[in-house]
Amino acid sequence: MADTLLAPAEAASALTPERPTPRRSGAFATPRDARRYALLVVGLVLVALGLVAAYLLLDNPGRPGSAGYWLVAQRRATSIVVIAVVAFCQGLATVAFQTVTGNRIVTPAILGFEALYVTVQTAGVYFLGVAGLTALSGVPQLLLQIGVMVALAVALFGWLLSGRFANLHVMLLVGVVLGTGLRSVSSFMQRLLTPSEFDVLTARMFGSVSNADASYLPVVIPLAGLAGGALLWRSRRLDVLSLGASAATGLGVEHRRETRIVLTLVAVLVAVSTALVGPMTFLGFLAATIAYQVSGTFSHRHVLPVAVLTAFVVLAGAYVTLKHVFYAQGMVSIIVELVGGTVFLVVLLRKGRL
């Protein structure tokens, strides 16, 4: 009997109808989610600044304040800028590519950019010898590589995304086939190289910040800035594209035209990153997957910056750890690809489908 009796205050609260939670419109469901996102961005920025300081200052052989000290710091600052450009390109390109393809486990590498890069490098050594790599260095050659990659991608988009039977999945399949064919051609030429030529070529086939030259930066930074800025400016349209072709068309967005524009911007970003440092297959996938998991929203205005910051933290953290802890700076791309590939398999097994 005593359990069924309620205190006056409890009885009044029981009779008062529960006030419904106010509905919110926007990227976050609750103010708490918005504060959590702000704290996440601030945390990533602080971690990135800490990694930059560690990369610049740790194990500097010069005496603090001397000319040699600042010379080493200046060279390392160039590497930091290269890491920032690569993170900016890979983070933005992968998130945008996954949005227009409607698939969270694909990366722009599926279009064959990296296979084309390896083929160009291998062909340079095959036809010109070790001096071919020198002939392929320099700003004009960098622009040529970027131009070839973008032209190939735009031709692919224009061919397979136009006409009556345009299909995005057919385009991805053709990209896979082209990439496989280019890798086969590269493997054939590599088997005919001398051991010394193959040894020199191998160093260029793995993504590394040391592959970049400081003279490239005045060229690649404006290119990446323009393409990345255009993607950020179109982030609201990316939100609409993520709803699918029918919903996007119903909301007034010309889906096919918008898809071509986004894929062209993605091609520019990936071509810049690949021509600058070499293949980084899973860096963008790793950054995009983490960004979607921690952002707490699917709004591209918020996911894209987190993806860029995550890519920078992953890449800079890998360089700092392997350089100053394990003294194996050349293993960075291998470790990033190993971790990214493992995450890819985990995501694929959890989804249970492609």
Image (cartoon, rainbow, N blue to C red):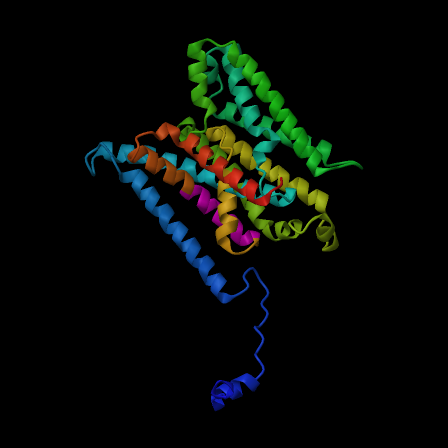
Observer-nearest residue: 185 or 254?
185
**Which corner quadrant of the image does residue 211 belong to?**
top left
Name the quarter where the C terminus is drawn.
Answer: top right
Residue 164, by quadrant, is top right
Q: Residue 245: where, in percent of width, then height?
A: 72, 48
Q: Residue furthest front?
A: 1
What is the x, y in percent for residue 226? 54, 41
In which quarter of the view is residue 40 placed?
bottom left
Residue 270 shown left or right of residue 71 in the figure = right
- Say if residue 291 shows up in the picture: yes
Foreground: 340 or 118?
Answer: 340
Magenta-drawn stretch, dominant element (helix, strand or loop): helix
Q: Residue at x 72, y 43 (%)?
A: 256
Q: At 61% across and 45% down in the image, what residue appears? A: 99
Q: Is residue 303 magenta?
A: yes
Q: Is residue 144 visible?
A: no
Q: Nearer the viewer, residue 65 or 259?
A: 259
Segment tinted magenta in the rendering? 300-313
Q: Residue furthest bottom?
A: 8
Q: Nearer the viewer, residue 56 or 279?
A: 279
Rendered location of residue 68, percent (x, y): 23, 31
For image coordinates 45% across by 58% down, the residue present is 38
> Where residue 36 sits in the image (x, y, percent)?
45, 60
